[in-house]
Image: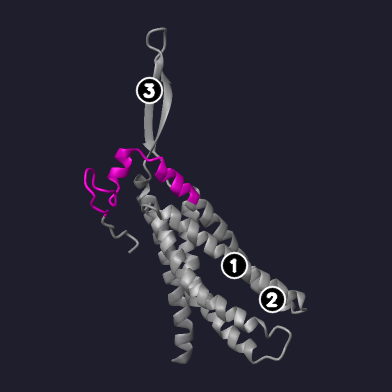
């Protein structure tokens, strides 16, 4: 029975992780109409009296940075919250009782684990909100990106310090933290892109959003629960 549980729990987690990640990608694609339209001039007609330009409109489409950070952010937030952060707690307990040159890593891992759990929640919310083009989600993504950048950058610096103290085993930890650093940068870039797009919305596009302000009143927008929950 114990062996079955040891195998079943990781399998269920991996299947759930893949399912949620794929679901976020599908939902991001289905909600692409929330990104407004791109308006462009096109030459039309021929001749001196018929030549002119007409305005064409098409769906803007989901920015690639949003799709990448939204989908991977869903996976990374779950991995951080349920695997990496708890592993940090275990590592902190191990190094707290170890008389070696890297014992100073125990408090570092403990603080990083506590921060990692909160960061995982922030990454999941930022991924969901940007994929659904929720209003002000760009600002949220920028803030989470900076937070994640400081978190992973600090971890890599601490791990590099452990390597410098002649403990080569921390190279593995640096390898695990590096994708998080890259994701943090992309999240920041995606947040700036989302904020720029929403700032360029026409009044009609803005009012069409489910959380837009009611025109002519002071009523605050009522948040609509998104398809990701």
Provide the residue designation for mark 2. 170
Pick the front one: 132 or 142: 142
Identify the residue shown where x is 41% and y is 43%: 199
Q: Dot 3 surroundings within 10 Å: few (below 14), some, or many (20 or more)?
A: few
Residue 6 % position (x, y) = 48, 85
* Front residue of this view, candidates 229 and 7: 229
- Estimate the x, y position of residue 8 in percent, counting from the top left: 44, 81
* Disc on the earlier residue, 3 or 1: 3
Q: Quadrant of residue 146?
A: bottom right
- Give residue 54's mark: 3
Q: Which residue is mark 1?
A: 152
Distance, label 1 to label 2, CA atoms, is 14 Å
Disc 3 to disc 2, C-alpha distance: 61 Å
Residue 162 vertical placement versus 148 (above, below)? below
Residue at the location (22% across, 43% down)? 216
Task: Tell me, yes or no, whether the highlighted magenta stretch contains residue 212.
Answer: yes
Nearer-N-terminus badge (1/2): 1
Q: Which residues are magenta?
A: 192-221
Q: Position of residue 53 (x, y in %)?
A: 40, 20
């Amino acid at each position: 029975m114990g062996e079955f549980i040891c195998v079943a729990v990781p399998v269920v987690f991996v299947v759930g992780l893949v399912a949620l990640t794929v679901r976020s990608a599908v939902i991001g694609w289905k909600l692409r109409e929330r990104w407004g339209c791109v308006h462009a001039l096109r030459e039309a007609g021929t001749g001196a009296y018929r030549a002119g330009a007409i305005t064409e409109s098409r769906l803007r489409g989901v920015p690639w940075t949003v799709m990448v950070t939204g989908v991977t952010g869903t996976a990374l937030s779950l991995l951080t919250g349920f695997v990496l952060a708890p592993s940090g707690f275990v590592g902190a307990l191990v190094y707290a009782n170890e008389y070696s040159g890297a014992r100073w890593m125990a408090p570092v891992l403990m603080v990083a684990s506590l921060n990692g759990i909160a960061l995982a929640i922030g990454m999941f919310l930022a991924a969901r909100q940007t994929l659904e083009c929720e209003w002000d989600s760009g600002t949220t993504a920028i803030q989470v990106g900076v937070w994640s950048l400081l978190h992973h950058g600090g971890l890599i610096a601490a791990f590099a310090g452990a390597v410098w103290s002649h403990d080569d085993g921390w190279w593995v930890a640096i390898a695990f933290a590096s994708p998080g650093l890259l994701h943090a940068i992309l999240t920041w870039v995606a947040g700036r892109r989302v904020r720029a797009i929403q700032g360029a919305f026409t009044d009609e596009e803005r009012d069409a959003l489910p959380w837009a302000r009611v025109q002519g009143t002071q009523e605050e927008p009522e948040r609509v629960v998104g398809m990701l929950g």
